[in-house]
Amino acid sequence: MQVQPRATKNSLHEIFKAIVFKMYQKNSTTDLTREELSSCLDVYMDALAMVGVNIEFPDEAKRNLLQFYS
């Protein structure tokens, strides 16, 4: 039997923070460059898809999010 935790806003946030730290050793997204954030988002979406959690994140929404990072 395999038990999967329920995806909550907090658990998804913690997963993203762990990815950011593992990839760039940074504790805050405000410390990431635009390219770093984009790479983290790609890894995050791939990881979630592997466990059956699919989040719609249209390219336009991703571009809007990334415009705030230099």
Image (cartoon, rainbow, N blue to C red):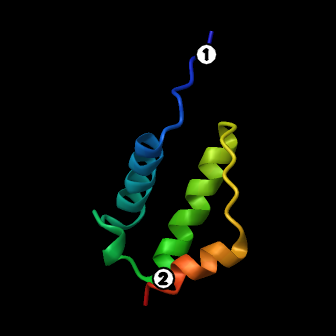
Who's the residue at 38% across and 76% down the image? 32
Where residue 37 sits in the image (x, y, percent)?
48, 73
Mark number displayed over residue 34? 2
Alpha carbons under labels 2 and 1: distance apart: 37 Å
Where residue 12 sits in the image (x, y, percent)?
48, 46
For marks 2 and 1 on the same chain, the one whose residue lies earlier in the sequence: 1
* Residue position for label 1: 2
What secondary structure is marked by label 2? helix
Where residue 47 sits in the image (x, y, percent)?
60, 48
- In the image, is 4 to the left or to the right of 19? right
Task: Farthest residue to the bottom: give it.
Answer: 70
Q: Which amino acid does label 1 sit on?
A: Gln
Q: What residue type is labelled 2?
A: Arg
Task: Give the quarter of the image for residue 29.
Answer: bottom left
Task: Farthest residue to the top: give it.
Answer: 1
Screen quadrant of the N terminus: top right
Please tell me how crowded label 2 is: few (under 14), some (14-19), or many (20+) other residues with Cα within 10 Å.
some
Where residue 56 sits in the image (x, y, percent)?
70, 57
What secondary structure is marked by label 1? loop
Who's the residue at 53% across and 80% down the image? 66
Task: Give the quarter of the image for residue 63.
Answer: bottom right
Who's the residue at 43% across and 90% down the image? 70
